[in-house]
Image (cartoon, rainbow, N blue to C red):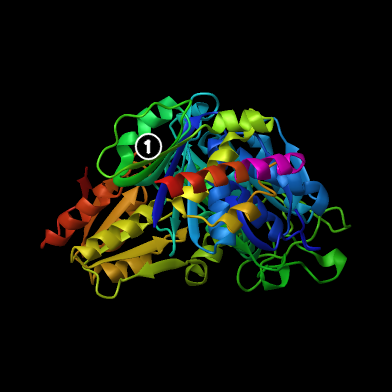
Amino acid sequence: MKTDPKGVLVGSHYLSGNHACAEGALSAGCRFLSVYPIMPALEVSERFLARAKEVGATFIQMEDEISTLAAVLGASWTGKKSMTVTSGPGLSLMMENLGLGVMLETPCVIVDIQSVGPGLGLPNRPSQGDMMQARWGSHGDYEIIALAPSSPQEMFDFTIKAFNLSEHYRVPVAVMSDEYVAHLKEKVVIPPANKIEIEPRRYYEGPKDSYLPFKRDEDLVPRMVDIGEGYKFHVTGLTHDDRGYPIMNEECQEYNVHPLVWKIRNYVDNIIEVQEVHVEDAEVIIISYGATSRAALKAMEQARNSGIKVGSLKLDTVWPFPEKRVAELAKKVKAFAVPEMNFGQIVLEVERCSYGNANVFFVHHGEKGVENTDNILSAVKQAAQQNSVKDGIIECE
Amino acid sequence: MAEIRFAGYGGQGIIKSGIIAGKAASIYDNKFSTMSQSFGPEARGGACSSQLVVSESKVLYPYVTKSDVLVAMSQEGYNKFESELSEEGILLIDEDLVKHKPPRGKIKIYSIPTTRFAEQLGRKIVSNVVMLGFFTAVTNIVSYEAMKKALPGSVPEKALDLNMKAFEKGYEYGKQKVKIK
């Protein structure tokens, strides 16, 4: 494999989602990967490891997923773009340090290749069962960013995007993939390094002795330094002041912890990205993300061929949830159909953001993943016939 | 659009066949292709399959629903996926490993002793590449040139010559078979 000086494997390649993810990370400048091995996420490490020496990256296998994410946070503070990759059981163990990463405002990327749970479940089958966990899994109030790729190309693109967002907002960013996308192989086009948009770390540039690690900029994001470079530095998971020292009162909580929420919420319009197809004249819109959107687009095509006006809203960004757009569309359509490889997670958000203006049909896409589109199609047909808005979510078989 | 199913048992290079044909189609023939595979214990010894969708436009939906081509390298693979094959489909089999039923509808059957040919070439392991050559000649879904370009980098470098020979062997045999039919 020949790469350019920045470690970008320029050209067209036939890659699995997992390998594309590793290439995305390397192209984004990620030089530290810490993992505890788990299927179906392993090939990301495999690829990263195969390329690590050439690009001067570090790979470390820790004793479990708790320390794995701890290592990622530490590496990030030394100035390395850092990532970990796991599946559901590992994500559960990471929840404690995810909260710490949010509290310490540490840029990093967590890739979750979702498989069927709970427990160890079916490590060889896809699921979207961790979507709510990514949002709410750690304790306390916070905001998080999560992206959902649906193809190897998006695994590449969204991994880069995840690094950019995490650097800009100083928050851990989750790439919520699944076994299906992880093992799918398709053409991935990797552009030259100068065509890839990279968000540089937002470094502090003032005098050394007046650095305050949690002093916020106007957009509420504090500036970073690399630890070990002679700056005064302190971090704690406790509520802290600008210096990073614990201050145990409500005022400090308001002053320094509430912005963890606002630094994201104030900028949702800059963060959220969706892909819309045929929404202009749609009576029914299929809202999907990740692997399921492949089946959604096919179902849309089938429905259009049989004369039903169906559109598609694909959520590239799942968290923060595109609530404004869903609310707008709810006023224009009869119904939303939401297929998910779980028992109903993002559909709860769709229902909430519809404010009773549109019916919401939930399509349970089980362990067979996106293997057929019949259930989406029948939900869409049912939805198109329904003329009054019913309470709650309508479950489809 | 063509939906292709490669079926056999783990170790035969069934997944690799999907990758090489998929790579040839999308990188060297400039078409679109999506390859997915059985993943898990079944891929390591038991029945194993890979699915490849090749299309002139972007592949929305990557699973095989009704296959146009079934490449069966084992009896179990044939038994499992025969019913999925379209009535106008093409069935390719290793004739020493698969016994087929009388064909349904207009299904065309092409058989080749891939494993025997591979053994004659020196190594049984290249039987999947013999089959890929045969597949290329019979189906015309992926071009000969693209397949030849996709092999380097997809097989171990030191075995490239052997794989190229295996591919040619299958391709030539396929060309003859097509002529006869």
Decide if residue A315 is on the left or right side of residue A160.
left
User: On the image, which quarter does residue A4 sit in?
Assistant: bottom right
* Residue A109 visible (yes or no): no
Q: Is mark 1 on a helix, strand or loop?
A: loop
Q: Farthest residue to the front: give it.
A: B180
The magenta stretch is: B156-167
Q: Which residue is drawn at 67% across and 42% down?
A: B165
* Residue A306 visible (yes or no): yes
The x, y position of residue A101, in whole percent, is 63, 49
State which quarter of the image contains the N terminus of chain B: bottom left
Q: Is residue B140 above or below residue A311?
A: above
The x, y position of residue A251, in whole percent, is 58, 58
The x, y position of residue B14, in whole percent, is 53, 36
Q: State whether the magenta stretch is mostly helix, strand or loop.
A: helix
| Chain at numbered mark 1 | A
User: On the image, which quarter does residue A231 sit in?
Assistant: bottom right
The x, y position of residue B142, in whole percent, is 51, 55
Decide if residue A342 is on the left or right side of residue B14.
left
Q: Mark 1 points at which residue?
A: A367
Q: Residue at x 59, y 53 (%)?
A: B147
Decide if residue A214 is on the left or right side of residue B114.
right
Q: Residue at x 73, y 39 (%)?
A: B159
Taking the magenta stretch, the answer to whether it contains residue B35 is: no
Decide if residue A97 is on the left or right side of residue A5.
left
Q: Which residue is drawn at 86% across and 53% down?
A: A228
